Image (cartoon, grey):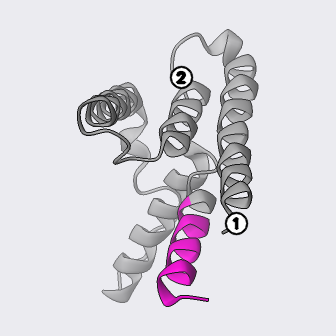
Amino acid sequence: MKKETVMGATNATMGGMSVISSYNVCHSLCIGVIALLSFFGIIVAGFPLAFLIPYQIYFWIFGILILIIALALYKIKGPCISKHIILANFGLLFAGIPFLQNYSLLFLIIGFTIAISAIALYFAARKKNGK
């Protein structure tokens, strides 16, 4: 295998595993902050980034803006960004909608269905192309 192929596959796998859900991303960041602080001898218990929870709507809006920019680049420049990645990002953003908490399970199921479908389509296209 080519070195670039292995590096790309590893990068995609690690990136995909880190965005399984917003909780896992948040938890990973908190653990990283705890590890960094412990390096300097500061002991922290709990979630040091819990103060960001009230700002989740702003992070979600920022994600939507980045998705819009990616769609604009795809439209202007052509297929410079994978359409499967754009679809998967849409699914993850849909799954993480911070509004309508009564329907969060429904949004979660639909969003992850979209994201998993995009990943399956990506691998089907790769298999079709012989990679």
Q: Give the image location of residue 28, x and y in percent.
A: 52, 63
Callout 2 crowding tier (Cα within 10 Å): few <14, some 14–19, many ≥20: some
Stretch of the chain drawn in magenta: 1-15
Query: In the rendered structure, does residue 129 fall within the stretch colored magenta?
Result: no
- Labels 1 and 2: the sequence-earlier one: 2
Q: Amino acid at mark 1?
A: Gly
Would you place residue 106 above or below residue 72 in this image?
above
Residue 7 is a magenta residue:
yes
The residue that appears at 34% across and 48% down in the rendered structure is 80
Q: Residues within 10 Å of mark 1 (few under 14, many from 20)?
A: few
Position of 109 compared to 8: left or right?
A: right
Q: Does 71 sit above or below residue 24?
A: above
Instruction: Determine the residue positioned at 57% across, 69% down.
Output: 14
- The quadrant of the picture occupied by the N terminus is bottom right
| Residue at 69% over, 28% down | 108
Give the foreground label among 1 and 2.
1
Q: Quadrant of the C terminus?
A: bottom right
For the residues labelled 1 and 2, say whether their Cβ atoms are less than 8 Å apart: no
As drawn, 57 above or below 128: above
Quadrant for residue 61, please give it.
Answer: top left
Give coordinates of residue 95: x percent, y percent.
Answer: 61, 29
Main SS of the magenta part reads helix
Name the spot of residue 34 as percent of width and height, x first. Answer: 44, 71
**Residue at position x 70%, y 35% from top?**
112
User: What residue sits right under mark 2 in the picture?
Assistant: 97
How far from the left and from the top, in percent, is residue 118? Answer: 65, 40
Q: Which mark is residue 10?
A: none
Q: Relative to residue 79, is residue 117 drawn left or right?
A: right
Q: CA distance from mark 1 to mark 2?
A: 37 Å
SS at mark 2 in the image = loop
Residue 130: give its label: 1
